[in-house]
Image (tube, helix red, strand yellow):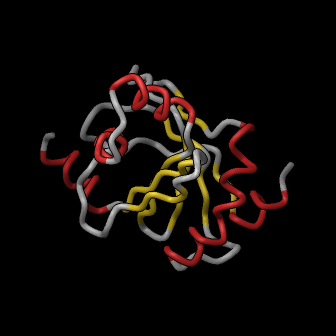
Amino acid sequence: MNNSEQSFHTNRRAFIIMHDGRGLVLEPKGSDLSHKQMFENIGLGALSVQYCLETYPRGYFMDDELCVYQGCDMTPGNKWELSQQNYAIVRQYMPKLQRVFNLNDNSNLYLGVLVGTIGSIWDKINKTTISDFMRTR
């Protein structure tokens, strides 16, 4: 991990929503673990990690904003967007995310990122607010 990648990972707070019954997996403040490493740390093998990166909602909190997405294709320019199928799951966990990160209904929420170069901060996409997200179908 290069210095800028480690800095980003350290300054954001990562989470995964494990809708297999494990619930919200949250890294402590200051952790530099990637989501892949988080999946590995809960005992998943390589194929399971790949599947979870593609299908489970995950994201991070940084600078008073929440970003939620899924995906694993590292080709620059690809979009890692939260799938419509996962909207209901994220809505279910939103009150807990709001409490953990001290967010309100007007806080910014992004429902994806554009894959960039490793070590850079990737552009967030699909900006909304928590209240607007909670109202969408």
- Height in image: 29 above or below 82? below
Residue 123: horizontal and vertical position, in percent?
46, 43
**Is residue 92 found left or right of 32 in the rendered image?**
right
Q: How many marks?
A: 0
**Is residue 93 found left or right of 85 in the rendered image?**
left
**Is residue 77 found left or right of 39 in the rendered image?**
right
Indicate the quadrant containing the N terminus: top left, top right, bottom left or bottom right.
Answer: top left
Residue 86: horizontal and vertical position, in percent?
68, 42
**Residue shown at the point (40%, 22%) measured from the top left:** 47
**Residue shown at the point (40%, 32%) measured from the top left:** 49
- Height in image: 68 above or below 135? above
- Height in image: 45 above or below 64? above
**Is residue 116 found left or right of 18 in the rendered image?**
left
- The answer to which quarter of the image holds residue 72 is top left
**Residue shown at the point (44%, 22%) measured from the top left:** 73
Residue 3: horizontal and vertical position, in percent?
13, 47
- Height in image: 115 above or below 99? above
Residue 93: horizontal and vertical position, in percent?
64, 62
**Residue shown at the point (53%, 79%) measured from the top left:** 102
**Residue sitting nearer the eye, 136 or 89:** 89
